[in-house]
Amino acid sequence: MVSVKLFLTASILLISLLSANTQMLDYIYPGFMTMYYSQVPTKEGYRSKQEEPNGSIREEIGVIMNPGTANEELVIMGMYRAYDEKSDTETMTIYTADKNGYKSRYKVMKRGLSAKLLMSLAKGSK
């Protein structure tokens, strides 16, 4: 019985410490989240944007369609662009999610200049 009380007391203490530390970090580093991430509530839903220092970006809009009716649904539209430094490749994905499921389209691009382009630039500068 004593071990159960001790466990419960320790659990409550741990949860309160973790919650206090989270609030303290928000107080100490308030600019960190706003530097890379923003979320704005709108009348119809929300709008969010996340930018990474390496150039990766994610933007998303969530809208409640037909609010207050039997046909009410959340529709999410967005795009993210991820950059892989090792392969110098950028992937851009555009997506929607609604009552019919998740649908996406993507495109993979090399950021570097191709050999053919470099050769044509070299020929043009002569």
Image: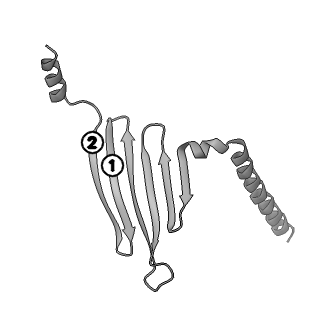
Task: Classify the position of the C terminus by image quarter.
Answer: top left
Given residues 96 and 45, the one toward you in this image is 45
Point 51% across, 66% down: residue: 45
- Quarter of the image that includes the N terminus: bottom right
Q: Residues within 10 Å of mark 2 (few under 14, many from 20)?
A: few
Q: Nearer the viewer, residue 57 or 82?
A: 57
> Left or right of 37: which side holds 57?
left
- The image shows residue 124 at horizontal and vertical percentages of 14, 19
Front residue (pair 46, 1):
46
- For label 2, the residue is 109
* Pointer 2 or 1: first along the chain: 1
* Amino acid at dot 2: Met
Secondary structure beneath label 1: strand
How many numbered discs sit on the rendered protein?
Answer: 2
Q: Are marks 2 and 1 in contact (CB under 8 Å)?
A: yes
In this view, 77 is above or below 107 = below
Q: Quadrant of residue 122?
A: top left
Q: Position of residue 74 (x, y in %)?
A: 45, 72
